[in-house]
Image: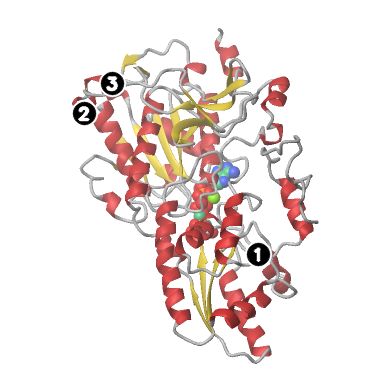
Amino acid sequence: MTLEKKMMMGPKSVIGEAGYVMEDVPHLGDYLLDLPTYSNPLQDNPAYSAVKQYFVNDDDAVVQKVVVHKNDPKGMHFRRAGSRQKVFFESDEVHACIVTCGGLCPGLNTVIREVVCGLYDMYGVRKVLGIVGGYKGFYSSNTINLTPKSVNDIHKKGGTILGTSRGGHDTSKIVNSIEDRGINQVYIIGGDGTQRGAALIYEEIQKRGLKVAVAGIPKTIDNDIAVIDKSFGFDTAVEEAQRAINAAHVEAESVENGIGLVKLMGRYSGFIAMYATLASRDVDCCLIPESSFHLEGKGQLLEFIEKRLKENGHMVIVVAEGAGQELIAESMRSISHKDASGNKLLLDIGLWLSHKIKAHFNKTKVSINLKYIDPTYMIRAVPSNASDNVYCTLLAHSAVHGAMAGYTGFTTGPVNGRHAYIPFHVCAVPAFLLRALLFVNLFGKQRITEMPNKVVITDRIWARLLSSTNQPSFLSSTDVEAKRDEDEPPTQLLDDGKDRCSTPPPNATP
Ligand SMILES: Nc1ncnc2c1ncn2[C@@H]1O[C@H](COP(=O)(O)OP(=O)(O)O)[C@@H](O)[C@H]1O
Ligand SMILES: O=P(O)(O)OC[C@H]1O[C@](O)(COP(=O)(O)O)[C@@H](O)[C@@H]1O
Ligand SMILES: [Mg+2]
């Protein structure tokens, strides 16, 4: 194949029998001809000497959907992460760099540590640079040398030893810096914005024909990155949130008509609020961006608060920072501001709700005692917990194995419990196969940053939350219908072949 032809190939897909599609990741060999390969040094590593199979089979893939039906096509797959028999870099040839971008998240230091140690211990790499202060650090800050010794204890600290920033993504300046420094592996740790930036860096590197592997490592405390099971730091955040909820509960319980209001992070997705509520059992009401609510009116928030106070004498409300933004905007006629990365700056729903609840009970002459707790930055700043630490290690090692094997333009992460390489770009799949795959609506959105991961309030998990808090859903039946239409069609069919949304079950009461 000629070089031009290889360059034109773009994102790849591997198509197999019975509707098997693998959305493959790019490889340095796609645009650089005749790259030499080397045997993987892992097989000489004493720690791995008892391993039955050192390497992942070349065509191992991870399936995107695990719940299937007998006539379903095999569906979408991603390349399985892990070490390969042949690597495309010699140990002393590697000059890696690591950068952390966007908001803080528990586990950032663990990932940095494990990329450094993974490169050193598994592949004998000796040159790893830390880029200081996020993307703009590539062209405006000093770098620091990272060694297993210098990163040994960093997983015990919150934050990122490299520093981070929003904004400042200048693709050509970044790639110039990569080229000038002779860097050939770039590990980019960050959320959706960062992964978009990483895709641009990968494209520019490919355009310049550089032998530089670009590996994205997804980070977001909000857990709003699509495709992967969950992001690191999320578990830690849910655990840490329990402390704030407990405090709110103690405060609320100790006084007459006590209300504990806790704001948790979640700009567009209410995962932290939802999981923290499900875990706690002390929460009476959880409000998330995906499920709108009103203050006034029958079955709405203020009425529910009145009811719960009458029943229990106290209550705890958990609100995700992105919830109810349209209500605040309406009542304050606010101008929308953005941060340096272009993310919309949110209005403080916690303060606003506190004010509205107090004003309401003032008007109705009921004395309440409301305590508002905003633990958001305290939660974000803690070191990762044990389970996140284990997860971060695997994530970092998967990225290292992928880059050493010559893969590039990918984000790594767990898909149904198995780590996979997910391409930055969606590959083209023939239309007939798309139809056969039965999830045409989702296609084109499977790339990590195309569509944020959101709580699907028509899924059973949200129903479990509503039933555990016994709060109203605050949605009208029209809202529910609209939500059902937005979400994926149900896969659970009744015996007569009609779906549960459109047809009431036999004997259902109207
Ligand atoms: N669409 C984009 N294209 C290129 N770079 C982006 C894009 N969106 C964000 N970035 C860059 O990614 C970095 C982190 O983005 P941000 O949205 O702040 O955090 P996160 O990656 O956690 O979502 C910033 O330096 C920002 O400039
Ligand atoms: O004050 P900052 O640093 O902009 O961070 C606030 C935002 O960071 C987050 O924790 C996560 O955002 P990112 O995923 O973009 O880093 C959001 O929940 C929150 O809105
Ligand atoms: Mg983001």
The Cα atoms of the two marked residues, 2 and 1, are separated by 52 Å
Q: Quadrant of residue 438?
A: top right
Please state which of the two labelled residues, at mark 3 or mark 1, is closer to the viewer.
3
Disc nearer the start of the sequence (2/1): 2
Q: How crowded is mark 2: few (under 14 residues within 10 Å), some or many (20 or more)?
A: few
What's the mark number on residue 47?
2
* 315 to the left or right of 380: right
What's the mark number on residue 52?
3
> Is disc 1's CB within 8 Å of ligand 2?
no
In this figure, which colouring scheme has been used for the structure?
secondary structure
Residue closest to the eye, 2 or 460: 460
Amino acid type assigned to the residue bearing label 3 in the image: Lys
Where is the C terminus found, in terms of image quarters? bottom right
Disc nearer the start of the sequence (3/1): 3
The Cα atoms of the two marked residues, 3 and 1, are separated by 53 Å
Please state which of the two labelled residues, at mark 2 or mark 3, is closer to the viewer.
3
- Quick check: marks 2 and 1 in contact, CB under 8 Å? no
Q: How crowded is mark 1: few (under 14 residues within 10 Å), some or many (20 or more)?
A: some
Disc nearer the start of the sequence (2/3): 2
Where is the N terminus found, in terms of image quarters? top right
Q: Mark 1 points at which residue?
A: 325
Name the residue at 66% across, 72% down: 301
Please state which of the two labelled residues, at mark 2 or mark 1, is closer to the viewer.
2
Residue 402: image location, x then y, percent:
41, 27
Residue 372: image location, x then y, percent:
51, 76
Amino acid type assigned to the residue bearing label 1 in the image: Gln
Name the residue at 55% across, 46% down: 193
